[in-house]
Amino acid sequence: MMDSSFFFGISTIAYFLAMVTYITYLGFKKKQIGLVATAITITGFVSQTIALVLRWKEFYAIEKSFLRAVPLTNLYESLIFFVWCLILAYLVIEFKYKNRSFGAFITPVAGLALAFIDLSGMSKSIEPLVPALQSNWLLAHVMMSFISYSMFGISFSTGLMYLIVRTEKRNEPAYIFWTVMLSIFIIVLAAMGLDFLTFKVGGQSQQQFLKSYLFKATFRNSSGFVESASWVVSAFFIFLVWRYGGIMKKVIKGFNISAEILDEITYKLIAIGFPIFTLGGLIFGALWANQAWGKYWSWDPKETWSLITWFLYAFYLHSRLMRGWRGKKVAMVAVIGFVAVIFTYLGVNLLLSGLHSYGSQ
Amino acid sequence: MEKAKNKTITDRIWGLFASIKFAVVIFSLIALTSIVGTVIEQNADPAKNLKILAKFVGKSGAPAAYSVLDKLGFMDMYHSWWFVTFLLLFAANLIICSLDRIPRIWKIVREPIRPLSPEHVARMSIRSTFTVKAKPAHVKDIATKAFRKIGFRPSESSSESGVQLYAEKGNFTRLGVYITHSSILVILVGAIIGVAFGFNGYLALQEGKMSPFAYQSSDKRIPLGFDVRCDKFEAQFYGDTDMPKSYKSWLSIWKNGVEVAKKTIVVNDPLTYNGITFYQASFGTVEDNLENGIVMLRLVAKDGKSQDFNTRLGGSFTIPDSGIEGRITNFSPALTVDRSGKPFTYNQNMVNPAIFVEFSAPGGKHYSGWIFKRFPQTWDLPDGSKVEFLDYWGVQYTGLQVRKDPGQGIVYVGCFILAFGLFVSFFMSHRRIWMNIVEEKGGTKILIGASAHRNRAAFEKKIEKLAAALGSGQKGE
């Protein structure tokens, strides 16, 4: 059947194919291969767009309001939209900077995320809106938040790449910073992957999965042995990344992207993402909160964390524009900024409680 | 060195507040303490936070950690004196660092663009030189038009070396940062006004009841200046599920015994009267009031004739033209059946209300059963008549958030200025162009110098367009 999940499937496959092609392109540096990679990515993007529109239509049949039928009301839908924004932003960068090297990084992230969403057994059903979400602010607030998140996401990876390229010695703070950050990022993803796998095997209930099973396969395992082994393996992994980080540098240097361009892309993305985040995330969020909860700001964990995120990116912009800080210091701020974004988006829902609990369903 | 020594204390404080370092310290203090505030649930039951703390310091350490954090104000930290101080320091930092820099920026904004020497023009960040075969006067005419075409109105100055056209746009955009900064101050002022002159209260209002007050806490009540009445409350659900579709309160405002306003409010659509706003926040059942509630029924006879009938728990009714008598003997706010088919109440809120009715029909027949408000299939009786359970009125209360915030308008204005300021700061720039037109043998030499204090790449394209209009491509020099 040609429903939304059919097209999501096509996109998943397309993104993986695109990854293979981008990597081949990096290996052979043939223009034709690059064009094919771009074409495949665009195919995946178009297919995902169709899927989103279809889902919007399916939802519209229930909600009867265009603005409120936006497919962004649970974790499943928001992750898919995040991937969509990521690919869109990537394609814009590819055309603007005429550089395909990031493709090998972004497409696997997109493909993995979509596959992950599909395999995890996250609730895909379209559910009607609970009273608090029945507002026309839904579209603007959630959509703009995710657009800015995806820009911050790419600035995170370009910032990290910048640090990888620019650091020399193993005892340099910036080097330690990026190796630890990258390894923690990979460890968390791997641990969550293991959670999903054991969850699939165990077949527990789906709804409460994320909240109750996060890291249960590893760091929060009931067996003390598995728990301590997870910590040891993680520490060892961080050590390995730290010890052999130089290899990453060689790989990225082979991409033909100068450190200056990485710095510029990081800045540009934040300079566009920050106003969108301020307007859509904070201001529209406040206006909506005032209408729904009778308070434009209530220091709810999600609000507080988005304020922290906002502070971090404001700091990034000020230190770059005012102090003329360039390079490693600001790149580290950009990386930390996205860690705050992830916590605002997922961490708050998974670990803390508050008014904004829609995303965890 | 001398100068540094002569600094007065005011200068030093000023310097401290204007520094980025100070801003970073304040940013970090606000951010780090806020993180603690998101982990510890604010204004929550102590037991809840003890449980949270136990995860960090263990069960035995939790009470001690709790009492320390409690004394420091972390249980309601966003209203603690020290957090408010951080916010005020942040505001002071914003004001002083802006005031510190504004005079310099203001000078650039106010001072009109002036002609520049050729050496200066040649050193601008965007530049282009070329020669065309035309008379300078002709070139000047074309150039003036080309300036207009890209949206600039050039001024002109002549010297012995030739003519210079120069123009600027968007000089005020340099103030974007300060517009943004001031908007944050406006928002803070609005918030302070809201806290000082407004209130935030709660009101649980039973169906049919009226209140001249809202409550800030159980012992602090705030007079509203009018009466608010809850005419009815209803929670609606999607289909057969318990997924809430809407929470509706029918509210009316009364003054001196006269109804002056009414509105059906739902979440996201409050009622405002006299600057006081009522938001749908929660609901519940007044359990000790069940016997006073009114059971509203519609009795439908076999031939379709219907009659509305109100009674109470324990009350009786007769279905017209049938001689069937019913007596309501039990009520459940939310009824379901367990696996063995035994009915039980699963929620104290009126999520799925049902009444138990014992019938006695002519001929000595007796039967009984549960009649659900949400399930019409339970309304039919064996002989074809129907008992529709419309409502059980007067036992639910609506939980209203009651708020007066005279600072809200100011906060909204601040938000608008913030959006505007950000737009100006990130998407606009101060752009300047100088163009020297100098006669040479057999042609005219054109020298363009331009600058944009932001988004230079976009402006470079415009300058290319300007140069192309003058024929820069014809003679590649």
Image (spheres, coloured by chain):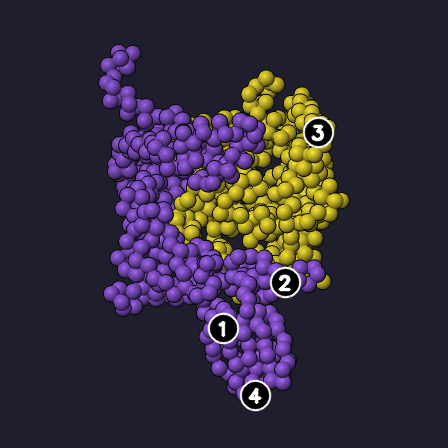
State the separation of the CA atoms marked 3 and 1: 63 Å
Kind of residue sitting beneath label 1: Gly
* In the rendered image, residues at marks 3 and 4 fall on the same chain: no
Q: Which mark is residue A224?
A: 3
Disc 1 target residue = B315
Q: Nearer the viewer, mark 3 or mark 2?
A: 2
Q: Nearer the viewer, mark 4 or mark 1?
A: 1
Q: Residue furthest front?
A: B364
Q: Earlier in the sequence, mark 4 or mark 1?
A: 4
Q: Which mark is residue B303?
A: 4
Quadrant of the image containing the N terminus of chain B: top left
Element under disc 2: strand
Residue depicted at x 37% and y 34%: B80
Visible residue check, residue A235: yes
Kind of residue sitting beneath label 3: Gly
Q: Quadrant of residue A250?
A: top right
Disc 2 target residue = B343
Task: Judge left or right: residue B127 versus residue A58.
Answer: left
Visible residue check, residue B444: no
State the separation of the CA atoms marked 2 and 4: 32 Å
